[in-house]
Image (cartoon, rainbow, N blue to C red):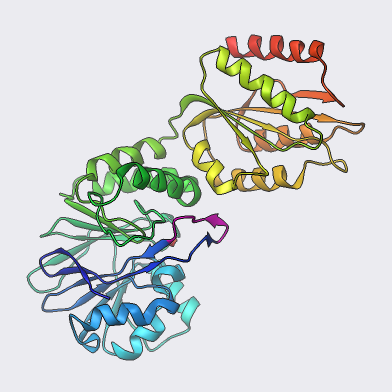
Amino acid sequence: MNPIKLKEGIYWVGEVDWELRNFHGYSTQRGSTYNAYLILDEKITLIDSVRPYLYDKMMQRLSSLINPADIHYIISNHVEMDHSGSLPLLTRTAKNATIITSPHGQKGLLAHYKRNDWNFKVVKTDETIALGKKNIKFVLTPLIHWPDNMMSFLIEDGILFSNDAFGQHIASSERFDDEYPLGIIIDEAEKYYANIVLPYSSQVQKAMDLVSPLRVDMIAPGHGIVWRSHVKTIVEEYKKWASNRVDNKCLIIYDTMWKSTEKIANVLQEIFESHGIPVKMTNLRNSHISDIVADVLTTRFICVGSPTLNSNMLPTVAGFLTYLKGLSPKNRIGLAFGSYGWGGQAVGHVEDTLKECGFEMMESIKIQYVPDETQLQEITNKVKQDLLKR
Ligand code: FEO
């Protein structure tokens, strides 16, 4: 349970959650970490904490460096319990600590933990607090990921403690981006953005403007790997993801009952590929929705297929679309397709939901029972014509 040094007098004292596989519906196949950081200065400062079931391990790391009763400031960058969950336990030991948080942070912490005996220092953007030799500047970043979020910037060391922003769900012994495969870190950061941050992309753009004048040498997020060698890379990725810029790619997402909807999916794949548009096929029975939205993040064409079951979409498709709509991706082109027996309502429901997402729609495809070669050729002709207009 050793702390890990970020820079002189600054340590990671969080904990690795090797077992985590589901984070409120987000599939976390690589586990995660809850990153807490300790700054040793005249006023000993702890930034964020861990989930309560890992509190003892965090305290072992802390206790190897300090007497936790001597903590002067606890900075709570985010109220969500994966970061604040240990505060009730911690404040039993760090009795005199002042909790530094945003205005929404104070309201949120009180609403969660009902502790009117806590000392708060509420900060606003650009406010600076002296810890002794070092100073921390605060940047309020509402809705990345809750209204209370803020980032803390340790001025002298250039470390941005960014909480959810720039995070990834990765459990590892390695703490830094030059110790772990960069491709995996970027993939997990992309998945994290798509599942957690995407609905708040306009707030991300504002936050990037606020932090861009800062001399950031290291980004220490609330989850996963610390960025020290690839800071520019992840900042550029965030700018792209926040702008809703997409690549000319196609994602075909479907479920099927008797493989008729799958036949349409396969024809769509051929059509898009024949136009030089790379395709990814995703059968909802085999893929987790949180992995699919990671692909949606950078994909222009989103085709969604469902047969009709009891006047509706298959539940897998309905669940995916509900999740997708909540994440509010922008600037996509949608296509609804599917087979049916008699009612045929599913394709209309898919189309309606994609429209509600704000997607520009291609003409829907709806085939009764099993599509034959003539019908598949008609689909090919129709979609090819539509693609020529895009
Ligand atoms: Fe990692 Fe919004 O909590």
- Within the image, what quadrant is residue 164 found in? bottom left
Determine if the magenta segment contains residue 28: yes
Q: Position of residue 29 (x, y in %)?
A: 49, 55
Image: 115 above or below 359: below
Q: Which residue: 48% across, 45% down?
A: 194
- The residue segment tinted magenta is 24-31
Q: For residue 261: magenta?
A: no
Q: Is residue 346 above or below residue 214?
A: above
Left or right, residue 59 beside residue 289: left
- The quarter of the displayed image where residue 84 is located: bottom left
Principal SS element in the magenta part? loop
Residue in the picture at 58% in, 9% down: 388
Instruction: Pick the quarter of the image with the C terminus.
Output: top right
The residue depicted at 36 percent of the width and 53 percent of the height is: 165
Q: Residue at x 39, y 69 (%)?
A: 83
In this rendering, position of residue 257 left or right of residue 33: right
**In front of the other: 37 or 76:** 37
Residue 328 placed where, x, y %? 55, 42
Question: Residue 181, image x and y in percent?
Answer: 31, 46
Determine which quarter of the picture holds residue 208. top left
Depth check: 335 or 22 in front? 22
